[in-house]
Amino acid sequence: MTDTPLSTAPLLLILPLIGFAFTAAFGRRLGKRAHIVPLVAIAAVWVLAMGLAIPALLGDPALGGEGSSLTLFTWIASGDLIFNVGIHVDGLTGALLLVVTSVGALVHLYSVGYMSHDGSYWRFFAYLNLFMFSMLLLVLADNLLVVFAAWELVGLSSYLLIGFWYTKREPGLASKKAFITNRVGDVGFALGLMGLVAVFGSLDIHTILAGIEAGALTGPAATVIALLVFCGAVGKSAQFPLHVWLPDAMEGPTPVSALIHAATMVNAGVYLVARMSPLFAASHEAMLIVAAIGIFTAIFAASIAFTQTDIKRVLAFSTLSQLGYMFAALGVGAWIPAIFHLITHGFFKGLLFLGSGSVIHAVDGEQEMPKMGGLARKIPITYATMLIGTIAIAGLPPLAGFWSKDEILGEAFKFGFGWVWLVGLLVAGMTAFYMFRLMGMTFWGESRVNPAVHVHESPWTMTLPLVALAVPTIVAGFLLGFPFADGILVHGLKPVFAPANELLGHEHEAWTLFGIDGLLMLASVTIAAIGTAIGIRLFSSDHTQLLSSITTRLRPLYEGSRSRWYFDDLNDLVFVQAGGRVARALWWFDRRVVDGAVNGVGTIASSSGRGLRQIQTGRVQNYALGIAVGLIAMVIVYLMVAA
Amino acid sequence: MPLPPTIPFIGITWADALFLLLGGVVLGSATLVVLGRDIIRNGLMLILTLGALAGIYVVLGASIVAGAQVLVYIGAISVLILFAIMLTQSKSASAQLNFQTQALPAALASALIGILLAVALGATQWGSTVYNDTPDPAGTATAAAVLFGPWLLAFEVASVLILAAVIGGIYLAMKPAESEEIEA
Amino acid sequence: MSGEMMTIAPLLTVIFGAVAVLIADMVVPARRYTPIAVALAALGAAAVFITAQGGGVTIALAGAYVTGPFVSYLGLLGITVTTITLLMTPDHVGDRGYPTAEFASILLFALAGAILVAASTDLVTLFIGLELLVIPGYLLAGYAKRDPLSTEGAVKYFLLGSFSSAILLFGIVLLWGSSGTASLSGIAAALASGSATPALAVALALITTGASFKIAAVPFHYWTPDAYQGSPTPITGYLSVGPKVGAFALAIKLFLVALAPLALLWVPVVAVLAAATMTLGNLVALTQLNVKRMLAYSSIAHTGYLMVGLVAAGLGEVAGISGILFYGAAYAFMNLGAFAVLTAIQGRPGSTTQLSDLAGLGRRHPLLAILAAVFLLSLTGIPPTAGFFAKAYVILAAVQAGGAAALLAIVAVLNAAVAACYYLRVIIYLFMREPAEPPVEVATPPLLRIGLILAAIGTIALGLAPTLLIEAVARAIAP
C-alpha cells in the first residue's frame, strides 16, 4: 500500500473524521479553543490534497490519465454482488479536491472570526469537519454505493448546518425544506443505482463506465437510468424544479453558505454527471434534457436575482444560475469547460459569499441591501475583494470567470447548440447586471445604514480568507485555461472525458483567435460589458426615480421575479396542501373506519371491567368484520387467479 | 331384520342421512349460540353443537376422537363455561346480551363466505387425492401408535402450549397483592 | 447425549428453562432479577446447544423435527431477541408493580414456539408451534393487567388472533385435504404434479389471510396499533419483533416450501398486499405524534419490506429469502433498540411517549439520544447501519427477480423516502428542540443499559460488516 501514489489519500478522510469525533466529544469543554483541532485537520488535508491534485492535473503519469485506484476494504460481499470501498484519483478528482479543500480550509479559518460570538462554537466546527469528510468521500469514492452514502452524508451535514440556529423558526424550516427536496432527487438517484445494478451487477464506477464504453447500455434504458441519476444531481445541485431549497438554505451561517451552498456540495451534482459522463453520452435524449434544464435554470434564476434585496439571496440565485451554466455545458458535451467553471465559480462565489458575510458582520447582521449603501470606504478590504469577485463572475477579462464562461459558450456554439449559446449569452449579460446592482446597492451611493450601527472592518481571520480567495479569482482562469483550449486543465481532464467524447463523436479543434472563437469571445465580452455598464449606471448613485419608473412599467415581471415566479407557492399547494390532505385522509380512514376504538379509549373509565364491557359491545367486531371482508376479497381474487 | 342399504324413497345411504342430520343440528344450534339472547341458553346450545359434532366423528368412524370430544368438550369445557357464566352473572345485571348494529353486515359476510366455500369445495374433484399418512381410524391401538409415533412431537408440544396458556391465564386472573401500585 | 436428544436439546432447554424460571420464583419468591437470571442461563445453554450442533442437518422424532443451518440461524436470532427483551423489560414492569417471573417464563415459551416453527416439517407441528409463539403474545400484551389500555389491547389481540388462527387452520386443513399429506415437502410434491383446484385457491386465500394477520400485513393489521399501544413499552418492542419474525419463518415454510409450486397464484396477491402494507403503514406513521404509536405503524411498514423479500423469493430469487433473514436480524436489533430507548425515557410510571417528551434529549442525555439516533437512522435505512443493508438486500432481490417485483422495489424505495420524514422528525426533536418542561425522567437501570448496548452493537456491526451475517444467511438457505 505504501508504494502507491495514493498512500496518503486515506488520511484525507481520516483527518476530518478525527476532527469531527474529537470536537463532538470534547468540543463543549474546549470553549473558544474548539476550532484548533478541526482547523489543523483541514489545513493538513489541504496540504495532502494539493499533493494529489496538482500532479493529477498536471498529468503526472501515476495520477493523471486513467487515474489511480486504491481498494481499502470489501464492504459487502454477497454472492456475486461485491462492494469494495476504495479511492480513485484522476484529473477530475484533482479538480474537485482543489476547490473543496482550498475553500474548505479558508472557510474554517473564516469561521473562527465569524462564529466567535456564537454559543455553539464547537458544534459548528464539528459539523464543518463532518461535512468535509462527507464531501471528500464523495469525490474520492470509486463505487457509486459509497458515493450515494456520501451523498446522503453531505445532505445530512448540510441539513445540520442550515438548521444550525435551530432555535429560530426559519432556519429550522429551511433545513427541513432542503432535506426533503433533496430526498425527492435522491429517490431518483437510488432508482438509477438499482437500474445500474440490474444492468451491470455492480456499482463500481469503472466497471460501469467500461461496460458503457463496450456498448452494454444503450437506447431507452440508458436514457431512463441517466435521467434517474440526473434526478439526484438536480436535487443536490438545486436545478429547476428542485431549486427551491437553496435560496432558503441561506438561513444558515454565512460560512456554510460559502462552503456548502456555493463552492462544494452544490457542485456534487455537476461532479456526478461529469463522473458518469459516458452514461449520459450514451443517450442523446438525456444530454438534451440536462442541457435544457441547465440553461433554463440559468436564465430563470438570473431573472429572480434581478429583484431580490437580501444580499445572500442574490448570491444564492446567482449560484443557481451558474450551476445551470455548468449543467448546460455538461449537456452539450463541453465537459472540461463545465469542470473549469466549477473550479473558478467555487473560488469566486466562495469569495463573494464570505465577502457578503463580512458585510453582514460589518452592519451588525443586516442582510437587506436597501439598508446598506456607501460601505466602500468603511470596509475597504471587503469591498476590494468583492469587487474582484464581481468582475470575475461578470465574465470580464482577464479574471477567472471570463475564461471558463467563454469556453462554455464557445463550445456550446461549436457543438451546434445555438439556443444554449444564445440564452447563455443573455444570462452572461444579466449576471453582470445583477452583480453590479448588488455592488452598487451595498457599497456605493449614500449610506442607508442604521446610524446606530458602528460599521467596522472584520478581523484578520475573516479578511485573510477573502484576500486568499481573491488570488485564485484573479489568476485561476489564466493559469488553468491558457492557452485557449490547450491549457493545463484540458490536459489534465482530457483522458477522463475521452470515453464520453468518443461516444459523442466530438472532435477537438484548434482554437483560432482570428476565427469563430475570437468572434464568440468578443460577443461574450461585449454582452458582459453591456450588463456591467447598465448595472453601474443604474446603481452607482441613487436613481430611485428612474428605477421606480422602470419597475412600474414592468410591474407583472417585477412582481413575478420578486416572488421567484411563485414556485414556492406552487410547491406549497401541490405537496404541502394536497399531499397533506391525502395523508390525513388515509389517517382518518384508519382512525375512524378501521381503528375507531382508540379514540374512545380516553373515555374508557378507569375500571378495567367497564373497559372490557366497552370492548365486548365495542369495535373489536368491526375489526373482525374487516378481516372477514378481507378474507372474502382474498377468496374471490384467488378463485379468479386460479381460474 | 336387516336395513336396506339406502333409505327407501329418498335414495341416500343411512350414513349420509345421519351426517346430514347431525350437520344440520351442528349448524342450527351454532346459529342459536350466536343469536340467542339468554346467555345460559347459548351455553346449552353450545353443548348441543359439540355433541352433534361428536356424532359426526362417530359417523366418520373416528370413535376415539368422538369419545375425547364428549369427555373433554361436553364433559369438561362446556360445563366449565356454564359455571363461569353463572358465577360471574351478578343479580342486578340482566342476563340479556346486547346486540350490535353490525349484525346484518356480519350475517351477509358469513353467508358470502359460506357460499364461496361451498361452491369452491363442491367444484373440486376430491377423488383424485391420495391420502398417505392417515391412520386407520378404528381402534385405540392404531391411534396410540400414531400419536406416539410420527405425531409425538405435536402431541407433546400441545401440552407445552396448554401449560403456557395456563400460566398466563393464572397470572392474568390472579388478584394483585396490596402493595402493588396501579399504573396511571 | 444421543444424537436425537442433541437435536432437540435447544427446544427442550428453552421449555425446561420456562418451567425452571417459575420454580426459581417459587423457591426465592418475588425477586425481580432471579427469574431473569434463570431465563438468561437457559438461553445461554440453548445457544451453546445450537452452536454445538454445528449447523449440520439432523433429524429427530421420526422426521417431525429437523434442524439445520436455517433452524440454527432462526434459533440464534430468537435467542437474541429474547435476551434483549429480557434485559429491557424487568425494571419497566417491576417498577409498575408487576412480577417478572411469569413474564420471563411466558417469553421462553414463545421462543420455544418460534424454534418449533422453524424446525417443523409438517402442518400440524407448524401450527402448534405458531400457537405456542403467539399465545404468549396475547398474555404479554395484557401483562399490565391493571391498565385498562393494556387489557383492552390484549383482549382485542386475543379475539382477533384466535379468529385468524381459525382461518389459518381451515386453510391448512384444506391444503392437507387437497394434497393428501401433512408433510411440507410432500405437499410441494403433490401440488407440483396436480392442478390448481378451486379448493386449493380457497386454501391459499385462507392461509394468506391467516398469515397476513400474524405478520400484521394490511388489511389484516387492525390489531397492531391497539395491542402495541396498550402493552408495556418493552413488551411492545418484543411484540413488534418476535412474533413477526417467527411468523415470517412460518410464511417461508408455508409459501416457499409447501406452496412453492403455486407461486404464480400467490405472488401477485402477496405483492399487492406488500405494496399496500408499506404504503399505509408509512403514511399513517407520518401523522402520528406519539412515538410508540408511530413505531407501531412503522412496524407495519417493515412488514411490507419483508414481504418484498417473500415476493422475490416466490419468483425464484434465492436472495429474497436471505433478504428476509437478514432483514429479520437487522430489524430485531434496531426496533428493539428504539423501544429500549422509549423504555428508558419512561423512567417514571405513567410517563408518556409523545414526540414532545423526546424534545431536547440530546442535551440532557446525549448518549441515549445518540443511540436513539442510531436506531432511527437504521430504521430509516441510512448507511452504514444494519437497516440500510436490510432494505438494500430485499430491494435488490426484488430488482433481480424482475418483472412486477421490480415495480414493487420502486414502491419500496418511494416508501423508504416517506419513512425518512417521520424517523428523522424524531431526531430533530432529540437534538434541535428545547428540552421539555418539566424534563422527562430517564431511567437506565443496568439491565436496560446492557440491552441498549447489545441492540446498538448489532445495529452498527451489521452496518459496518454485513458480510459477517450474510455468510450465516447464505449457509442458512443453502439447499
Image: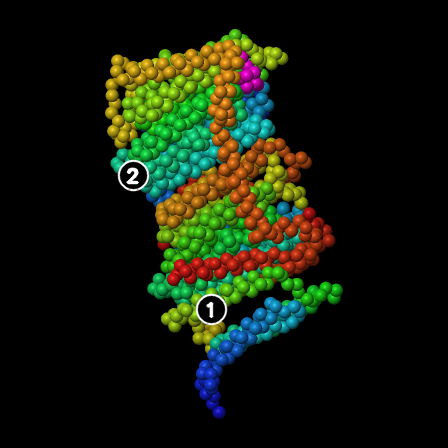
Give the residue number, with chain letter if any, for mark 1: B118
- Image location of residue C298, percent across then percent down: 52, 45
Does residue A46 show up magenta in the picture?
A: no
User: For the C terminus of chain C, which image quadrant?
Assistant: bottom left
Identify which residue is drawn at 26% across, 31% down: A503
Rendered residue at 57%/56% (across/down): A623
Chain for disc number 2:
A
Q: Toward which corner of the image does residue C428 lie, by quadrant? A: top right
Same subunit: marks 1 and 2: no
Using residue C349 as the reference point, say whether residue A461 is left or right of it.
left
Mark 2 lies on a secondary structure that is: helix
* Main secondary structure found in the magenta portion: loop
Q: How many marks?
A: 2
Q: Nearer the viewer, residue A119 or C298?
A: C298
Q: Amino acid at mark 2?
A: Gly
Q: Could you tell me residue A580's position as x and y percent?
A: 54, 40
Coloring scheme used? rainbow
Percent of width and height locating residue A525: 36, 14
Q: Which residue is mark 2?
A: A219
Near-viewer residue (C194 or C135): C194
Seen in the image, is C449 located left or right of residue A413?
right
Magenta stretch in the rendered image: A365-373
Q: Position of residue C276 (x, y in %)?
A: 47, 49
Residue at the extreme bottom of the image, as rendered = B1
C-alpha gap between disc 1 and disc 2: 53 Å
**On residue A456, which mark appears?**
none
Local secondary structure at mark 1: helix
